[in-house]
Image (tube, grey):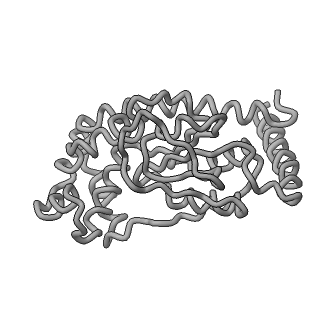
């Protein structure tokens, strides 16, 4: 019975892909509603920017990477722009009506490890926090307890944000599956290469070494517990979204 359901489900996916492929051939390259995309650091945001530009090649993407400032007045998109992507407070563009809001998140422990080695690979460039990090040669646990790290989700990018306002929340651990779900939701296809991979020498082995240190993992989990709770709550929201994607496909029961 399970195998029959699996085959039936796969067939529905192929039919659905074919249906919106015709829409793409017919030139559906402008989003029907504004897209607000929040890029939390080390959460596949560079790759997703590529997806946006290839899914909507005739629509310019505004990149907003200035600061994560809390400005409750709200901003609108400049004339000629219907997509914005970058490092900004999730509620910054709250005045944009009928917007499709999307973000991808990563487990805070893995995100912090990736961010740590990324910072080690970047030379001094005038960022006070980063410069201090390099001068003091911080270890991963000290880095994880910095205010901008331990509360990066809940106290910075998504501070005071109702995550139910997001139409799509993806998980970098299931990136291909989630991007496919997003494409079915929006009715477009784009390219999603893995870009901006960590350039630190032997990053993969260093990451494996840290993840294999159970004592360190316990300490990192405690340091990041607030963001882990936030992440897990968002993943429950993701499950609902992905379930709805499947249930609203043509012929879904």
Image quadrant where one finds the C terminus: top right
Toward the front, the furthest residue is 79
- For image coordinates 35% across by 40% down, the residue present is 156
- For image coordinates 46% across by 28% down, the residue present is 233
Q: How many numbered circles are shown?
A: 0
Relative horizontal placement of residue 225, taking residue 197 as reference (left or right): left
Image quadrant where one finds the N terminus: top right
Percent from the top left, x then y, of residue 30? 75, 53
Compare residues 200 and 33 and report the one nearer the observer: 33
Relative horizontal placement of residue 157, taking residue 223 as reference (left or right): right
Percent from the top left, x then y, of residue 132? 15, 59
Q: Is residue 209 above or below residue 144?
A: below
Relative horizontal placement of residue 233, taking residue 50 as reference (left or right): left
Occupied quadrant, residue 214: top left
Percent from the top left, x then y, of residue 245? 71, 36
Compare residues 126 and 201 and report the one nearer the observer: 126
Percent from the top left, x then y, of residue 45? 50, 55
- For image coordinates 12% across by 64% down, the residue present is 135
Toward the left, the furthest residue is 136
Compare residues 92 and 186 and report the one nearer the observer: 92
- For image coordinates 86% across by 36% down, the residue present is 250
Occupied quadrant, residue 133: bottom left
Compare residues 223 and 202 and report the one nearer the observer: 223
Q: Is residue 149 above or below residue 27?
A: above
């Amino acid at each position: 019975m399970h195998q029959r359901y699996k085959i039936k489900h796969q067939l529905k996916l192929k039919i659905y892909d074919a249906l919106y492929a015709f829409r793409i051939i017919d030139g559906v390259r402008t989003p029907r509603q504004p897209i607000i995309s929040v890029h939390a650091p080390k959460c596949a945001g560079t790759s997703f920017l590529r997806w946006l530009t290839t899914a909507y090649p005739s629509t310019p993407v505004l990149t907003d990477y200035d600061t994560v400032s809390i400005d409750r007045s709200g901003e609108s998109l400049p004339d000629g722009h219907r997509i914005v992507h970058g490092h900004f407070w999730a509620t910054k563009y709250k005045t944009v009506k009928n917007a499709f809001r999307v973000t991808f998140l990563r487990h805070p422990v893995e995100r912090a490890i990736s961010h740590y080695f990324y910072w080690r690979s970047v030379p001094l460039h005038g960022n006070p926090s980063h410069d201090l990090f390099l001068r003091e040669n911080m270890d991963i646990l000290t880095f994880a307890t910095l205010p901008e790290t331990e509360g990066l989700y809940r106290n910075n990018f998504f501070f005071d944000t109702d995550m139910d306002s997001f139409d799509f929340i993806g998980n970098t651990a299931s990136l291909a599956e989630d991007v496919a779900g997003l494409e079915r939701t929006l009715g477009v296809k784009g390219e999603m290469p893995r870009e901006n991979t960590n350039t630190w020498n032997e990053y993969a082995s260093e990451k494996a070494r840290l993840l294999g240190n159970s004592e360190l993992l316990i300490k990192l989990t405690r340091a990041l517990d607030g963001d882990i709770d936030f992440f897990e709550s968002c993943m429950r929201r993701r499950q609902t979204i992905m379930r709805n994607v499947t249930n609203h496909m043509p012929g879904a029961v």
